[in-house]
Structure formats: structure tokens, C-alpha cells
Image (cartoon, grey):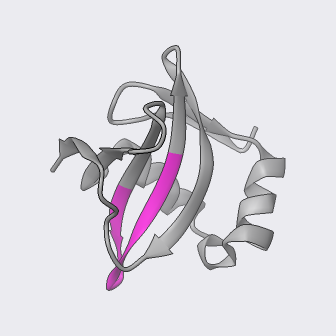
Amino acid sequence: MLFEVESKLKKKIRISNEHWKHISEIKHPEVSGLVNEIKQTLISPIEIKRSNADKNVYLYYSKHKSNFLCVVTRHLNGHGFIITAYITSKIKKGDIIWKQ
């Protein structure tokens, strides 16, 4: 396990070393080296949205330079895991679950 943290929504969110390697080296290399920022985004986001497509998927956002860091998670039974993470210029549409 790379890490597990308790998110702003009181869910224990985890990610394995293997899955992090897939995200940071293949899918979204722009987040390589941002492990601490990803943890902080889960713990202290500026906004959390629920996906319009899947009610168990939550998007945690934080500021990253002039953009946003988005950490996409799936919540199941009080726990969760990171699906992906990426840098984006805008916050996606969706139900606002929490806002700073």
C-alpha cells in the first residue's frame, strides 16, 4: 500500500503502489511526484463533487498552480480507493457535496 488517509468525508481512502505507478507513469504523468499534494487534496480539498455518472464516485479538488488537482475516488462501505488523479483547468459539473 502506498498510503491510506481519512478524507474530508471521513472515508479511509487508499491507493496501492502498483495502481499509483499506473496513474503516474502511464495515464497521467503530470501528477508524478504529487503524492503529498494528493493526500492533502483528500484531507483538505477546496471542493468535493459527486459524479453524475456514478453515485459512488467522488471528485476531490485542490488548487495546483494556476489549475486544479482532481483526485477521483470510489467510496464503498466507509472506505474508498483512488481511481485516478489529474491536473485540470476547471472543476467538472456535478453535485457539490462539500465546499470550502
Question: Would residue 34 be found to the left or right of residue 1 on screen?
Answer: left
Question: Residue at left 35%, top 58%?
Answer: 61
Extent of the magenta region: 61-72
Quadrant hosting residue 30: bottom right
In the picture provided, is 100 more to the left or to the right than 93?
left
Q: Is residue 53 magenta?
A: no
Residue sitting farthest toward the top? 77
- The location of residue 51, given as percent across then percent down, is 41, 45
View extreme (right): residue:
18
The residue sitting at 48% across, 31% down in the picture is: 56
Question: Can residue 1 be seen?
Answer: yes
Residue under the image location 36 percent in, 82 percent down: 65
Q: Nearer the viewer, residue 47 or 37?
A: 47
Quadrant housing residue 95: top left
Q: Residue 26: x and y, percent?
A: 79, 71
Q: Give the left or right position of residue 15, taking residue 79 as reference.
A: right
Q: Main secondary structure of the magenta part?
A: strand
- Closest to the observer, 94 or 10: 94
Question: Farthest residue in the bottom direction?
Answer: 66
Q: How many marks?
A: 0
- The image quadrant where one finds the N terminus is top right
Q: Looking at the picture, how far across and down is residue 85, in whole percent?
A: 56, 60
Q: Which residue lies most toward the left here? A: 100
- Asked if residue 42 is positioned above or below residue 33 in the image, the reply reads above
Residue 44 visible to an observer of this rendering: no
Residue 100 horizontal/vertical position (percent): 15, 50
Q: Residue at the spot x=54%, y=35% of the render?
A: 74
Tell me if 92 is positioned left or right of 32 in this view: left
From what the image shows, is residue 21 above or below residue 63?
A: above
